[in-house]
Image: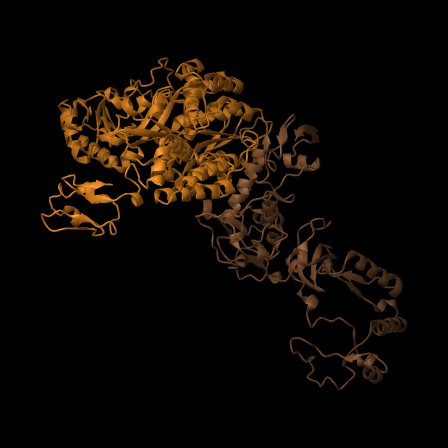
Amino acid sequence: MTVTLTINGQKVTTAEGSTILEAARSAGIYIPTLCHHPDLSNVGACRICVVEVVGARNLQTACTTPIAEGMVVYTDSEIVRATRRFVLEMLLSDHPNDCMTCEVSGDCELQDLVYDYGVKWPEHKGKRHNWEIDPDPNPFVFIDRNKCILCGRCVRACAEIQNRDVWNFAHRGFRTKLVAGADQFMLDARCESCGQCVAYCPVGALYDKMSLGKGRANQVQKVRTTCSYCGVGCNFDLNVRDGRIVRVTSAPDAPVNGMALCVKGRYGYDYVHHPDRLTAPLVRARWLQGVEEKLKGGEWQVFVPQGNGRDGGDGSDHLTVTPDTFIQTDWDTALDVVARKFAEEKRLHGSGAFGMLASAKCTNEENYLFNKFARQILGTNTIDHCARL
Amino acid sequence: MGEQTNVRIVEDAALTSTKDLPSQWIAVCMGTGCVSSASAEVRQALIQELERHGLSSQVEVRRTGCFGFCAAGPIVVIHPDETFYTRVTPADVKDIVEQHILANRRVERLMYRDPVTKVPIEKWYEIGFYSKQQRIVLHNCGIIDPENIDHYLAREGYQALHKVLSEMTPDQVIDEVIRSGLRGRGGGGFPTGLKWKITRQTPRWPKYVICNADEGDPGAFMDRSTLEGDPHSVIEGMIIAAYAIGARYGYIYCRAEYPLAIHRLQVALDQARQRGFLGGNIRGFDFSFDLYIKEGAGAFVCGEETALMASIQGDRGNPWPRPPYPAVSGLWGQPSNVNNVKSYAYVPHIIRLGADWFKQLGAPDNPGTAIFALTGMVNNTGLIEVPMGITLREIIYDIGGGIPDGRKFKAVQTGGPLGGCLPEAYLDTPVDFDSLCAAGAVMGSGGMIVADETTCMVEFAKYFMRFACDESCGKCPPCRIGSTRMLETLECITAGLGTLEDLDYLRYLANGMQKGSLCALGQLAPSPVMSALRHFEDEFRAHIEERRCPAGKCHALITYEIIADLCTGCMVCARNCPTNAIRGEKRQPHVIDPALCERCGLCKELCKFDAIVVR
C-alpha cells in the first residue's frame, strides 16, 4: 500500500507507515536531524526536524509523524526555520564555545546545523553546565558532558544495537545528565567497550580516548578495511594520518556490520604500530644455508626482540648464532623452507601425516584457500576449524 | 444471562439523597486534609465517647471522603440533622455527644459563622461555600464510607455497569457518552466518547484502559479527593470504558504521594473483585476485566499521557511525540484509552441517568460540572464542584467568600502551572473549556489560585516558571533550556537587574517553547508568564524602569523602614530580628540597617503600632 502526500508542493508517493522524514528523503527533500539515526528508533527529542503539517495543532517532528493520505507538509517555511534556529540557539546557550579545539570540529552535526541556520553564539547571563571533563577511567571512551545535547543516540545505540543498556539519563530538566548505569563508571555498568555510543554521538560529547589530539576529520585519510580479528568480516575505516592509524571509525555502508563493531575492531589497532610486531619472517638458523654470508652481506639479520626489553627468552648473546637462533629472512627464503619441509614430509610419511587447523580469524576467502591447499596440494582431509571446538 | 446485582433500582435522580442510610450517624471527614489536622483522632474519640454512653449501636461513626471545605477542617456532620461542625478537635467530642446526640442541642461554637453577619449556620447546604455548588462526581464524598462497597452500592453504585452489561452493546455505550457531550476533565477537553470510539476502532488487541491520577498541579487535589472519597465511581467508570472499547486489563496510574488514595483504591479493588465486579466473567456476563494500580514516582510530566504510559512500562517518564495517539499506539504499542479520574467518575452517572440528563447540566458544548481546588487569597479555600458556565466572580466571591481582610482582588490563575492568569476585567468570564481558552487562560485539570494586591505578579509568574523548570523532563531542548532561560530572566527582573530587552527576550523564549516543545508541558509552561506580562506589564516595567516592586514582595527591591513618629521603642522588633538588623534604645525610635536586613518581614508582622513600612 502506498500513500501520496504533498511536501513543499511536490507530490510524493511512498509506502504506508513511513514517516514524513522517510517520505521526504525518498523524494530527495532534505530535512535536518540530530537525534534521528536510521539505525535507531525515533524519539522526537531534538526538535530539529520539525515541519509544518497543515491542519496539525503545532509543528510536528518529521522523524516520528506517520504520513497520511493527502497530508500537506512544509519542511522549510519561515516558522519552521525560526523554530529550528531557536532550538539551535538553546542548545548553543548551554554548550562550550570551543569548536577551535574540539576533536570533532568539521565532523559535528551540531556545528553543521548552526552554520546552515546562521545561528550566532548566544551571550546570556544564565548558567552553562560545567561538568568534569573525562571523568570516567575506562580506557576507551572519552566523555565531555558539557558538549552533550541529550539527543539520546548513545542511549539507544547501546540498548538497541549492543543490547547492553549502559547509558541512560538521570535527573530531569536542565539538570538532566547522561549517566552510565546508576551514575557509575562505564565498566561497572555492563559496558563492554564496543564504542557504539561514540560512533553514534553527533557531537563531541563521546569520543575515542586513544584518538584524542591525533587528528580531526579533515586531517586524516580514511582507508576502508576488513577487520582481521575474526571471520565475521566487519568493515570499517582506518583513519590514517602521516602513515599511522590514529582512529577507527564505523563505515555506515559496511555490508556485514553497518556501524557496529566490537572492542577489538574499534580499539584493537594499536598493535599495528607496536615495535614488537613481526613484520618479516623469522627462520631458525638450522633450516637455512649460508647464514654467515647473508648476515655479513646485510641481507638477513639476527632477530633481536624490541620493545618490552625482552631478550628472546634464552638469555643468550644475540650476536652468537646457534642453530636455534631466529634469523630474519626475506619471504622467498622462508616460504621455500616451508615448502621444502611440506614436500619432504609428504614424501616420507604420505598425506595422512598432515593435520590442518584453520582459524576463525581468517576471512572466508582465506579459509577457502586453506581448504583447497589441504585437500588438493597436501592431499589430506584432516582439516578442522577452531570455531567447531 | 448472569445473576442480578443485589442493588435496588432507584428511580429517584436526586443525587444527594441519604434515605438508604441509617437514620442517625456521624460523618467524619477522613480526606488527607482533615486527617492531617487530626480527624482520625476525632473519629476515635467519637467512637469511645459514644461507647461510654452506650450509644454504639444506635449511632454510627462513619469515615467519609472530603467535604471540600478544607479551610474549615476537620469537619464532622451529624445526620440526619445535617449539622455541619467545623474545626473539630478531640476535645470537642464530649460536647458533640453530650449536647447534640444526647440533649439534641446544637454546639454553636463549632458551627460555621457567616463571615459578615457572624450568625452561626447549621446546615451544610446553607453555607455560602456550598450554595452554588452542584455535586455529581463528589456526590458520595462526605456521605459514604469509601472503604465499604455496600455504601457505594446503596447509593446506586454499579447499577450503571449492570445496565451496560445487561442492556447495551459497546457501541451503544460509546454513542451514549458521545451524545452526553462529556469532555475530558484532564484539561484538554477532548470529547471522551470520541476517544473511546477511536480506541475501539483500532483493530488490534489487547487494548488497555488507563486512568490518569497523577495529579501534579501545586495546590490541586481534585483527583485525590475523588479517589479517597469515592473510589468505586472511578472503578465503575473504567469498567464501563473497558467494556465499550474492548479492553481486558486496565491501570490506574496514581502518584505515590497519595498513599491514602492508593490504600482506598486497593481496598475498593479488592472488594469489587470479591463481589465479582472485576475479574473473569463480571457478574456472570461474558465480559472480563481487571485493574491494577501503578504508583507513580512523583513527576509532574507523568500526567502527560505518553509519559504516563512510558512510566507504566517501567521506562523513564518522558513523553513521546503524538501522533500516533495512544488510541492507536499507546501502552506497549497497543491501543490505549487514557482518561482523567473525573472523566471516568462521570460515566456511571451518564449511563444511569442518561446523556440527556447530563447535557442539560452546565453550559452549551461544555456540559456537566467542573471541579476546582480553590486556593490562594480567598476566605474559603477547598474543593468545589460547580456547574460549567458559572462565572469566576461567583466562584471567588460567592463560594470562596472573597478576599481575606478586605484586600483587593488582583488575578486568578486557572489551569495551574500550565494555565494563565486573568485580571479583574475577566471576572465575569464563564468557567468552561472554550470561554477560558478564549480569554487566554485554560481550564486545566482544576487548579484555581487567587492572587490579591499583596501578590507580586512577576514573583507569581516566576513561581510557576520555577515549577515548570523543576518538572521539565529534560528530553527536548526548547523546554529543558528555554524554561531555564525564562526563569533566569525573571530572576534578573525580580532582583532589580532587568532591562526592557528582557521583556522581549521572555516573549521570544515563550514563542520558541510554544512552537518547539515536544509535549504540553513545554508548550504551555510559558503561559503563566505570558498572561502576567499581557495583563500586568506595568508591574514588570516598574521592576525594571523604577527598580520598584509595587506589591512590596521582591526582596531586592524593597526596604523596611521604621517611622520614627510611630515607634514607641518597645524593642519587640529588635529582639525578634533574626539578623539583628534593628537597633535602638528602649523607648527611643528604632532604626533598621538595610545592609543587615534580610527583608523577612517579621518585624512588620510583630509591630503593634504599624510603625514599620515597606518602601
Residue sitting at the far right: A347
Residue A116 visible within the image: yes
Residue ID at (34%, 45%): B495
Residue B478's x, y, as percent? 50, 40
* Image vertical order of residue B323 relative to residue B17, above or below: below
Nearer to us in this view, B362 or A28:
A28
For the C terminus of chain B, which image quadrant? top left
Residue A167 at x, y percent in the picture: 54, 51
**Vertical placement of B615 versus A71: above or below?**
below
Rendered location of residue B449, percent (x, y): 33, 31
Viewer-nearest residue: B570 or B331: B570
Q: Tell me where residue B55 appears, x and y as whole percent.
A: 18, 27
Q: Quadrant of residue A270?
A: bottom right
In the rendered image, the residue lying farthest to the front is: B545
Q: Nearer the viewer, residue B331 or A29?
A: A29
The number of numbered badges drawn on the structure is 0
Instruction: Name the residue: 26% across, 48% down.
Output: B598
Q: In the rendering, what colour is chain A? A: brown
Quadrant of the rendered structure where residue B161 is?
Answer: top left
